[in-house]
Image (cartoon, helix red, strand yellow):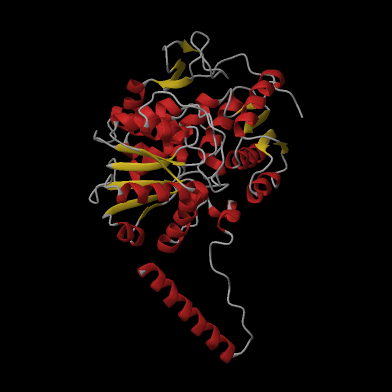
Amino acid sequence: MSQVTQSQTTQTTATFRALKCKECGEEYKLEAKHVCEQCFGPLEVSYDYDALRRQVTRETIQAGPNSMWRYRAFLPVATDNPIDVGTGMTPLVKSNRLARRLGLKNLYIKNDAVNMPTLSFKDRVVSVALTRAQELGFSTVSCASTGNLANSTAAIAAYAGLDCCVFIPADLEAGKILGTLVYNPTVMAVKGNYDQVNRLCCEVANTQGWGFVNINLRPYYSEGSKTLGFEVAEQLGWKLPDHIVAPLASGSLFTKIYKGFQEFVKVGLVEDKSVRFSGAQAEGCSPIAQAFKENRDFVTPVKPNTIAKSLAIGNPADAVYAIDVAQKTNGNIESVTDAEIIEGMKLLAETEGIFTETAGGTTIAVLKKLVEAGKIDPDETTVVYITGNGLKTQEAIQGYIGEPLTIEPKLDSFERALERSHTLDRLEWQQVLI
């Protein structure tokens, strides 16, 4: 596997202009760098919004590709030919049956469970990160992942012709491991949790000179999540929702949807309005929810113990920023049990025909919990973000759903089985009523 020689020139555009520390404001060149040298705060891409205001209109966006790259001017890449495998512009589904079940009138589901190419929102961030990696001269890319990111990095690296080595916890779901190996990267299965994987990757990034999408390329990578905000605003008819509910792992997705809404307001694409931000965590790994509940501006790291492995980050990098967004928008951050996560997966599938992974089950379960607590107005336009596909985490619901009725190829065998099925249905309804 080849070692990278990073280009010595910094590519810029008229829209993204520098890396800026989120804590002290120190600015840096647009290089593969993610930590401030002055205060060790995280770096974020800053933009020339005056230039964006002059260049971008609703019409120029709609004339772009039917992918996330219709928002290229808002993303930190210089090229006019980014890595575009059809990522983004996923459905915003107007919920009917789930909304009625919960007592809501205006519920929408942003369904990234059908995103391209690997069925999760991570395809967005990786498309940006690998495009920028090519611009910076990297030929080998990598990541620390709880599964979905490894899938995306391996797939998009294969498409782009980049060498790829990914790091995952060794106990990931089989679907996510197979969904990475099929693209023929080098896969390092680490005997430890995600936080241990991430620490190892920080050391590797310093020694190998690779482009780690969520380490030295993180400022660029994280910007891809803004497109989940952009698309919702456009799909709602260039309007912002009243309330969003999204999963929390590192906290980055949550904060970037917020940034996306704010950027559309800044350049005049949508009218400003108050949008409430609510976050979802699993109780077995809920450091952000715990800090929010206790009104703390810091998190206490935890050891993950949950079926929602894609959310199992015990020491989340963007936790304080996610808490700040929830607080200043009058939102909430809640956690749910593994049992509630499974019920959330089943509820979404039964009502809307969407099979989500455990992260989506967490989000639906928290949505339900917020409704029952009176924390979502039934008349609000609420958008719930489903970020991954249930085919990746089938183990989570094994033993919690029905079994096929095995019959002989005869009419009477079918009729007996159908009667048994109706009897079981009646018993289940009686249990519900009791």
Residue furthest front in the image: 434
Identify which residue is drawn at 53% across, 10% down.
Answer: 37
| 162 sits left or right of 123 in the view | right
Residue furthest top in the image: 38
Q: Nearer the viewer, residue 41 or 302?
A: 302
Please say whether residue 71 is visible from this viewpoint: no
The image shows residue 227 at horizontal and vertical percentages of: 43, 37
The image shows residue 297 at horizontal and vertical percentages of: 39, 23
The image shows residue 296 at horizontal and vertical percentages of: 38, 25
Please say whether residue 347 is visible from this viewpoint: yes
Q: Is residue 50 above or below residue 326?
A: above
Identify which residue is drawn at 51% across, 41% down.
Answer: 284
In which quadrant of the rendered view does residue 290 lie?
Answer: top left
Residue furthest right in the image: 1
Q: Nearer the viewer, residue 204 or 397?
A: 397
Position of the N terminus, as image quadrant, is top right
Tell me how many marks there are.
0
In which quadrant of the rendered view does residue 375 lie?
Answer: top left
Identify which residue is drawn at 61% across, 42% down.
Answer: 147
Q: Nearer the viewer, residue 3 or 356?
A: 356
Position of the C terminus, as image quadrant, is bottom left
Identify which residue is drawn at 34% across, 33% down.
Answer: 326
The image shows residue 166 at horizontal and vertical percentages of: 67, 35
